[in-house]
Each structure stands twice: as structure tokens, then as C-alpha cells.
Image: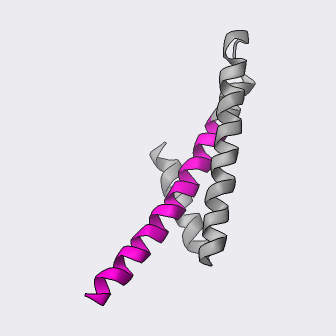
Amino acid sequence: MQYNIKNKKAQKDIDLLKSILDTKRELLIANKNFESAEAELVDYYSYQIKANKAKLDYLIKQVKQKGIVVDMINNLQIRLEQTKAI
């Protein structure tokens, strides 16, 4: 039974890291859309940018509090796979 508890904790940590990567991608998209936005959409994209930055700050704070350390090589591989999917 203890194995399942560790497995659930590891899955939550992985989900948290995936959320960070997803939020970074959403922030990048919002920034690109802001750069080419028509006058009516400037406020909308600036709100998205601000919301994604706040979410990213929160998620990074959660990772630091949990003491999660990321292997940068594996992180880069995940990021490359997600970029190919877009």
C-alpha cells in the first residue's frame, strides 16, 4: 500500500511540472498573439499574459516548496516533444 502512496506523490509532482510547461507554452502563445493583436484584442491578450505569469509564479513556488529538482536534460526532451506536437 505504501508503494501506491509514493506513486501518487510522484504522479502529482509530474503533473505539477507538466502544468508549468503548459503554462509557459500558453504564455508564449499569448505574447505572440499580443504582438499581432487588433485594437479590440489588446486588452484580452494583456489579461492572458498577466494571468499566465501569475499562474507560472504560483506553480514555480509550489515546486520550490516541495523541493522538486528537475533534470534539465529530460526537461529539454519533454519540451522538444511538446513543441513538435504544436
Residue at image coords 65%, 39%: 51
**Furthest residue toward bottom:** 2
Q: Hey, which quadrant is residue 66 in on the image? A: bottom right
Q: Would residue 81 be found to the left or right of residue 56 on screen?
A: left
**Furthest residue toward left:** 1
- In percent of width and height, residue 37 lies at 69, 18
Viewer-closest of 42 and 76: 42
Viewer-closest of 20 and 5: 5
Residue at image coords 40%, 70%: 11
Residue at image coords 65%, 22%: 44
Q: Hey, which quadrant is residue 12 in on the image? A: bottom left
Q: Would residue 73 be found to the left or right of residue 16 on screen?
A: right
Q: Is residue 28 visible?
A: yes
The stretch drawn in magenta includes residue 6: yes
Tell me how the rendering is colored. one colour
Q: Is residue 70 visible?
A: no
The stretch drawn in magenta includes residue 16: yes
Q: Please, is residue 2 above or below residue 84 in the view?
A: below
Quadrant containing the N terminus is bottom left
Q: Please, is residue 32 above or below residue 79 in the view?
A: above
- In percent of width and height, residue 22 lies at 53, 50
- In percent of width and height, residue 70 lies at 60, 74
Chain part drawn in magenta: 1-29
Count of picture labels: 0
Q: Please, is residue 79 above or below residue 27 in the view?
A: below
Residue at image coords 66%, 41%: 28
What is the magenta segment's predominant secondary structure? helix
Q: Please, is residue 51 above or below residue 73 in the view?
A: above
